[in-house]
Image (cartoon, rainbow, N blue to C red):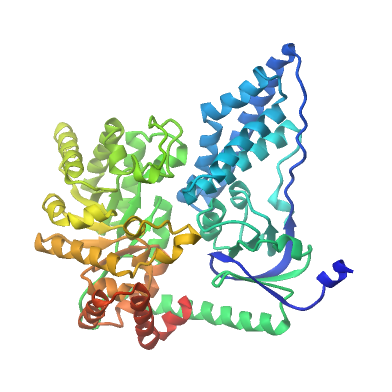
């Protein structure tokens, strides 16, 4: 009776959490976990070498699987997103993790399957109890690796995404990053999961693939059956089970209008300058991960590269990149951009981005640890190689260097000293140097930093996170992650004023820069260099061309007097709604 009731034809709306925007409609492809009970077998001592060999073969095969998936992702999506799977490779190269499994086999005479299950379960349990939201999500990576090892040891082939009918809505309790990496637009129309968060690697991958995704639906796997219709609203975090014809018609019309509107805006502003109504020029640049991203920069009319995340050259191959390979990459970008500026951020490792052979001790809180410039100043040999490579290529175009995660003037002076030494020894000119303002300390001390740099760029994502002491991936404190919070606006204003007093330009390269709602406010605060995802440039350019500097400053002055970030955000949205309604309609 219950079964029949659950299969009624009535529409059901389920509220979850949006992790990738967009709308998708299709039939359910229910992905069940392929876990099987792990059986414990006691080994005879003379069987240990063979069991260790089985485990070693499983590790090698799993590593090859992940590397194959990485190459696939790099080819179809990009180097930055392929780097997501570096965490998987780090687990497979973690001597402590592997030795614990080998010890279970050698000392306790457990079979390899049971040893893998025992050790991975301990790690998953430990990660589940940590307070840091990002680290807690890494239990999914360990679980994924354990699942692949057990598949191999059990003689089972890895699950294939090829069996998914095109356009399906994939429903799962959760989706492993390595599985998400195999998805394609033509296969997956959308994702709906019982569990997950915005910082999970699967969510990051879904956004990169532009696949609408909603997570934290709790029991969606129990409420649907294969072949049933599903509509995903990734903008509002809603899933409709068995949507009505009227619902589908409404969403179809909405998406068709938005698509036509976006195409119209892109075509309308292509080739036009980002000039305000009073002819004040604004520079709209792009953030990139690899030379392949230049196609989109050109397509959407970017004025240059405001942030080249150079660490992806290293993460791509899981090792330190040689000097010549770096030179080749930097030169490819510079030559394609001609005279337009290219700002290369120096190696930004640490936190969640580490190489397998990085000689840095494990840290209890890596996001407050040895990362960014701090890391480079401990790994000076690799840092000098990168500085020399950048300086070598600077003669081919308008190339600049930018240090990440600066908190102290002495760090900046040490880095500049290393740069001068490298350039003098190689007979090279010293390129223009800038810093990222990502910590409250750097913002407050911007007046002390300014005399030693040619430019500054505000990394709003980290600045907000550190200033508000709020992880944006943590639901419990997500209400504090407010770009328009008075504290953030004042830190930006402090930075801009200190830089202006020293004749130093300030840009911004965080997510705020690509937000059409925030752009007028940032310009009013004195920032006329904005760097963003290339596809955001047409919308922001449309907004820039709709406002004068006088109006932008008035918005900023009013915002600085406000005590509420929500009020500031609402005022900016109201301005956009009245002055640029087509852009407002697109962003919702």
Q: Is residue 476 above or below residue 110?
A: below
Q: Quadrant of residue 276?
A: bottom left
Left or right relative to 1: residue 404: left
Count every numbered label the image shows and give the total: 0
Q: Is residue 356 above or below residue 292?
A: above
Residue 332 visible to the viewer: yes
Residue 288 in the image: x percent, y percent? 38, 55
Q: Is residue 227 above or below residue 50?
A: below
Q: Residue at x 42, y 62 (%)?
A: 296
Between 430 and 394, the residue placed more toward the observer is 430
Residue 507 in the image: x percent, y percent? 25, 62
Q: Quadrant of residue 528?
A: bottom left
Q: Is residue 492 above or below residue 517?
A: above
Left or right relative to 447: residue 110: right
Q: Residue at x 47, y 57 (%)?
A: 473
Say which quadrant the N terminus sits in: bottom right
Left or right relative to 220: residue 315: left
Residue 397 visible to the viewer: no
Q: Residue furthest top?
A: 46
Q: Residue furthest bottom?
A: 578
Between 5 and 52, the residue placed more toward the observer is 5
Residue 252 in the image: x percent, y percent? 63, 80
Q: Residue at x 44, y 61 (%)?
A: 477
Residue 266 in the image: x percent, y percent? 42, 75
Q: Residue at x 43, y 36 (%)?
A: 355
């Amino acid at each position: 009776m219950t079964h029949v009731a659950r299969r009624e034809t009535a529409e059901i709306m389920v509220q979850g959490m949006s992790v990738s925007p967009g709308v998708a409609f299709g039939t359910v492809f229910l992905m069940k976990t392929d876990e099987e009970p792990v059986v414990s077998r006691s080994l005879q001592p003379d069987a240990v070498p063979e069991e260790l060999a089985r485990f070693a073969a499983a590790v090698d095969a799993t590593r090859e699987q992940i590397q194959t998936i990485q190459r696939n992702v790099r080819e179809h999506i990009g180097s930055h997103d392929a780097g997501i799977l570096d965490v998987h490779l780090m687990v497979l190269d973690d001597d402590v993790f592997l030795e614990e499994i080998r010890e279970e086999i050698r000392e306790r005479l457990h079979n390899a399957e049971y040893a893998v299950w025992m050790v991975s379960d301990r790690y998953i349990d430990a990660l589940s109890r940590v307070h840091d939201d990002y680290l807690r999500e890494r239990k999914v990576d360990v679980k994924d690796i354990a699942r692949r090892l057990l598949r191999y040891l059990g003689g089972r082939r890895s699950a294939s995404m090829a069996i998914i009918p095109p356009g399906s809505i994939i429903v799962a309790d959760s989706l492993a990053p390595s599985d998400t990496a195999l998805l394609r637009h033509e296969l997956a129309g959308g994702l709906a999961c019982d569990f997950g968060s915005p910082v999970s690697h699967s969510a990051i991958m879904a956004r990169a693939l532009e696949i609408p995704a909603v997570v934290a639906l709790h029991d969606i796997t129990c409420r649907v059956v294969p072949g049933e219709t599903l509509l995903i609203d990734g903008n509002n975090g809603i899933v409709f089970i068995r949507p009505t014809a009227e619902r589908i018609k409404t969403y179809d019309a909405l998406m068709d209008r938005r698509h036509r509107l976006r195409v119209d805006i892109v075509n309308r502003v292509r080739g036009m300058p980002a000039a305000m109504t009073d002819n004040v020029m604004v520079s709209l640049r792009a953030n990139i991960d690899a030379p392949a991203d230049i196609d989109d920069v050109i397509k959407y009319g970017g004025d240059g590269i405001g942030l080249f995340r150079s660490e992806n050259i290293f993460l791509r191959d899981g090792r330190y990149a040689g000097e010549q390979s770096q030179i080749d990459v930097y030169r490819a970008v510079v030559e394609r951009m001609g005279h337009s500026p290219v700002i290369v951020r120096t190696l930004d490792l640490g936190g969640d981005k580490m190489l397998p052979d990085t000689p840095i001790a494990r840290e209890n809180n890596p996001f407050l640890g040895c990362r960014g410039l701090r890391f480079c100043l401990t790994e000076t040999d690799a840092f000098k190689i990168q500085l020399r490579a950048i300086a070598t290529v600077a003669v081919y175009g308008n190339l600049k260097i930018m240090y990440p995660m600066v908190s102290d003037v002495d760090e900046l002076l040490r880095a500049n000293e290393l740069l001068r030494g490298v350039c003098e020894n190689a007979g090279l000119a010293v390129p223009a140097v800038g810093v990222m303002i990502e910590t409250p300390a750097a913002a407050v001390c911007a007046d002390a930093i300014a005399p030693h740099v040619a430019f500054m760029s505000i990394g709003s994502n980290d600045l907000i996170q550190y200033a508000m002491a709020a992880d944006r991936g943590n639901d419990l404190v997500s209400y504090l992650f407010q770009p328009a919070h008075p504290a953030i606006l004042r830190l930006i204003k402090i930075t801009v004023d200190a830089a202006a007093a020293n004749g130093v330009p300030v840009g911004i390269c965080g997510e705020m820069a690509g937000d059409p709602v925030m752009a007028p406010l940032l310009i009013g605060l004195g920032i006329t260099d904005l760097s963003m995802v290339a596809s955001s440039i047409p919308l922001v350019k449309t907004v820039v061309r709709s406002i004068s500097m006088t109006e932008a400053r008035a918005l900023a002055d009013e915002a600085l007097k406000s005590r509420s970030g929500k009020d500031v955000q609402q005022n900016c949205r109201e301005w956009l709604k009245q002055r640029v309604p087509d852009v407002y309609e697109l962003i919702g």
